[in-house]
């Protein structure tokens, strides 16, 4: 083959492939995790839920700031006692298989959830019955007041599927999700990718990309390489330690936004010395949060300024505990622990958590709190923390790394599971924090669905707990995603979900 | 020979039964509760209890084992606790990618490894020896994930010749992962070939051959090389057995949907049925491959006979 001919072929290749590439409306989304299920009622991880949300919708949903908004419901009302919630449904919407969306469809889904068989059945646990009022109205009647119910309805676990599909596939709907969303299910290869294509008859208006393929790229360096080589258009998470690499890349946009993931050190408040509030306050003064954020989290976090993150409903800002060793030492002395004491540091072995806990261990040495560090994998970690019992005198004084993301977006789920007396292990109040005032406020927050009343209860709850320092407060993570400049209208949500409804490839 | 082969094949069964008992017990010795992991961090006790019952994890260990083995003999490996898909299907999805990668990585690591090792032995103490060994020591020393990322940077990001990751059946997608996987194995092969070769060269029959006046080339290739191959073949078998288990690092870096990642994901959530099936499969690989290796001995050295 002569040189001219080769050049000609190469040239025609470039001409042909150039425009074709620009016009491609097939998006590849590079993720860290792998999809585990596509049945929303039986999904317990954020990533699978996020993929489901591209195809399925619920009565309520979240906007990009995690505020609850009506989705398949047009509007809703509730009674003062927070025991009855009535939803007016939108009319004229069809599922991808042509089944009409109506009160009957809601009933089939909610009763499926209420059967108790699924991982998200607990969302509908407060429900006594679902009343179909008419074709476009449903009423949830609760067993007892539950002020956060609207958030349970907005939760990804309450997404609605076509009743015809539920009947046809049974529990195999996890491989055949059929909803009302902007995208239609194409294929799921377990352990590899999930592909969805656009819904040409989407009720909100035209969808601007043809398809999205969700591909797990577990190694963060490879994920970034996919984006840089143009083989992925959006990646999340973008590893913060690699931000420098793409700072000057003209084809790449970095998106940062606050998450609702709070990280803190659980202090075992069951026995001395950690049962002493002064000691716990000393720990908070001794922690250098900024250093931990910089070193263990690559700068992708902000200091925690309440027991719940700012983007959670009913958050109230507190003042950050300053890094003040003098105050910390004074408090230790006042409590009679000037010479310090021994604890066990516990942490999962994921690298940023381990590094953070090592730093905590180092920083607390300054006020003579010392002890060995035990790290283990997630399953062993839960097993350990949840095997502790309040009446067991052998539970050691421990300081344990912990993180929480309240998937309902509401203060109740950011506080109750972690700090209510009723949530002692085997539930997730690992530090056995017990406070009558807080327990009362949690109840008050649930006794009404009136935002004013709830706001007040949770504000007080945050004020009182912040001072009592049941945790060594650390940080709220910042989410970092990266995308191709040509891709618009796609962004991460604070809960680790993402919004792709308005995605668009521009030239 | 065939009779011997079949007899050995049958002997695999009791090995696998013992492995199944150990596997069943070991995976449950790990601290951690699959129901807890499946239910998610914020699950309530009721959800976890329901799940435990549904998965049959509330029954005594012996009962669980008996049910499990009953099903295994009927060809049913159970359901993955995590995905609720049949374990057999899940493995069938990931077996071909791992197999393809293992064969490709092995093929060229044997080619280069044995070649470099033999060169180093033949030219022992000369520059060829040093060059070959520097290359192979580097191969062992370079961490796989680093090599993988480096190759991606060069060939995918800067040159744009090859895809970063992917498993859609294109040959171009296989090149970088198999090179990365093969590099370590090639280095091991080279080292092993070298030492096996040198051992053989010390043998008396080599001196005898040389004393008889056999040409150096003939000594090397006919007398030394064939005999040196026996331990090398053992090594190839062993390495292949490992590769069939899936290389976690390479599968992570190249997002290759194989068995290594599957295993890691299963351990993370204590997916008992998947772990048990994988342990059985891995044991089968090793027993079966060592049987094949024994057979290959006979082909290389006619003095070895099995009755």
Image (spheres, grey):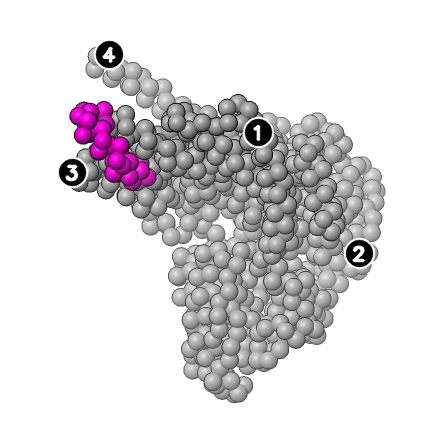
Q: Nearer the viewer, residue A41 or B182?
A: B182
The residue shown at (58%, 34%) is B11
Q: Residue furthest left?
A: B126
Which residue corresponds to mark 2? A83
Residue A425, magenta (yes or no)? no
- Which class describes the residues within 10 Å of circle 4: few (<14), some (14-19), or many (20+)? few
Which mark identifies residue A1?
4
Q: Nearer the viewer, residue B171 or B202?
A: B202
The residue shown at (46%, 83%) is A329
Q: Position of residue B273 (x, y in %)?
A: 64, 42
Which residue corresponds to mark 3? B126
Q: Is residue A389 left or right of residue A140?
A: left
Q: Secondary structure at mark 2?
A: loop
Mark pair 2, 3: CA separation? 88 Å
Mark 4, chain letter? Answer: A
Task: Tell me where the magenta segment starts and ends, as one range.
Answer: B192-219
Q: Nearer the viewer, residue B21 or A130?
A: B21
Nearer mark to the viewer, of 2 and 1: 1
Which mark identifies residue B7?
1
């Amino acid at each position: 083959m002569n040189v001219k001919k080769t050049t000609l072929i190469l040239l025609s290749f470039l001409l042909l492939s150039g425009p074709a590439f620009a016009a491609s409306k097939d998006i590849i989304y590079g993720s860290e995790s792998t999809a585990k299920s596509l049945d929303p009622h039986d999904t317990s991880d954020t990533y699978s839920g996020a993929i489901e949300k591209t195809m399925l919708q619920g009565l309520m949903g979240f906007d990009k700031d995690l505020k609850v908004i009506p989705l398949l419901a047009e509007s809703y009302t509730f009674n003062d006692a927070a025991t009855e919630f009535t939803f007016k449904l939108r009319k004229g919407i069809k599922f991808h298989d042509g089944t009409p969306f109506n009160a009957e469809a809601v009933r089939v889904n909610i009763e499926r959830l209420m059967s108790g068989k699924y991982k998200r059945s607990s969302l509908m646990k407060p429900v006594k019955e679902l009343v179909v009022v008419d074709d476009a109205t449903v009423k949830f009647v609760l067993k007892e007041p539950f002020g956060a119910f609207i958030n349970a309805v907005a939760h990804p676990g309450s997404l609605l599927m076509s009743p015809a599909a539920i009947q046809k596939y049974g529990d195999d709907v996890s491989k055949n999700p059929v909803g009302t969303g902007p995208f239609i299910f194409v294929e799921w290869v377990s352990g590899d990718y999930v592909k969805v294509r656009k819904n040409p008859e989407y009720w909100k208006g035209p969808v601007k990309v043809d398809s999205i393929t969700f591909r797990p790229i577990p190694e963060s360096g490879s994920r970034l390489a996919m984006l840089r080589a143009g083989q992925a258009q959006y990646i999340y998470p973008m590893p913060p330690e690699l931000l420098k690499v793409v700072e000057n890349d003209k084809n790449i946009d970095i998106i940062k936004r606050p998450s609702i993931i709070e990280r803190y050190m659980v202090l075992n408040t069951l026995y001395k010395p950690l049962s002493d509030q002064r000691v716990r306050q000393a720990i908070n003064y001794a922690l250098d949060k900024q250093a931990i954020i910089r070193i263990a989290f690559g700068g992708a976090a902000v200091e925690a300024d309440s027991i719940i993150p700012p983007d959670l409903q009913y958050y109230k800002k507190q003042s950050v505990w300053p890094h003040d060793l003098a105050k910390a030492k004074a408090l230790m002395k006042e409590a009679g622990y000037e010479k310090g004491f021994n604890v066990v540091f516990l942490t999962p072995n994921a690298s940023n958590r381990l590094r953070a806990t090592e730093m905590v261990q180092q920083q607390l040495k300054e006020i003579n709190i010392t002890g060995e560090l035990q790290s283990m994998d997630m399953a062993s970690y839960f097993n350990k923390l949840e095997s502790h019992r309040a009446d067991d005198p052998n539970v050691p004084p421990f300081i344990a790394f912990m993180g929480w993301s309240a998937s309902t977006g509401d203060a109740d789920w950011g506080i109750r599971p972690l700090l209510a007396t009723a949530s002692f292990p085997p539930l997730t109040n690992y530090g056995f924090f017990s406070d009558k005032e807080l327990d009362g406020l949690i109840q008050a927050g649930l006794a009404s669905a009136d935002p004013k009343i709830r706001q007040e209860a949770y504000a007080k709850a945050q004020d009182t707990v912040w001072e009592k320092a049941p945790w060594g407060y650390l940080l709220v993570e910042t989410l970092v995603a990266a995308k191709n400049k040509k891709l618009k209208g796609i962004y991460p949500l604070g809960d680790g979900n993402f919004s792709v409804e308005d995605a668009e490839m521009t030239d | 020979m065939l009779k011997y082969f079949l007899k050995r094949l049958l002997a695999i069964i009791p090995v696998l039964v013992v492995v199944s008992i150990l596997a069943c017990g070991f995976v449950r010795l790990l601290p951690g509760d699959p129901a807890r992991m499946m239910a998610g961090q914020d699950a309530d006790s009721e959800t976890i209890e329901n799940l435990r019952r549904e998965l049959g994890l509330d029954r005594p260990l012996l009962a669980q084992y008996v049910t499990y083995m009953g099903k295994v003999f009927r060809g049913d490996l159970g359901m993955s606790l995590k995905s609720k898909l049949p374990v057999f299907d899940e493995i069938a999805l990931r077996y071909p990618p791992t197999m393809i990668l293992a064969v490709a990585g092995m093929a060229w690591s044997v080619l280069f490894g044995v070649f470099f090792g033999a060169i180093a032995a033949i030219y022992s103490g000369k520059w060829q020896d040093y060059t070959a060994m520097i290359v192979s020591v580097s191969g062992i020393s370079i961490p796989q994930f680093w090599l993988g990322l480096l190759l991606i940077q060069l060939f995918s990001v800067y040159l744009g010749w090859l895809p970063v990751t992917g498993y859609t059946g294109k040959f171009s997608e296989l090149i970088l992962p198999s090179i990365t996987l093969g590099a370590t194995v090639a280095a091991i092969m080279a080292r092993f070939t070298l030492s096996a070769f040198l051992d053989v060269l010390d043998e008396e029959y080599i001196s005898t051959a040389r004393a008889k006046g056999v040409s150096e080339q003939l000594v090397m290739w006919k007398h030394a090389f064939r005999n040196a191959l026996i331990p090398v073949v053992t090594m190839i078998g062993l390495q292949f057995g490992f590769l069939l288990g899936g290389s976690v690092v390479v599968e992570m870096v190249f997002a290759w949907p194989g068995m290594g990642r599957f295993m890691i994901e299963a351990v993370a959530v204590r997916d008992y049925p998947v772990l048990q099936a994988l342990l059985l499969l891995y044991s089968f690989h090793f027993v079966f491959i060592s049987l094949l290796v024994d057979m290959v001995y006979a082909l290389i050295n006619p003095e070895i006979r099995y009755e």
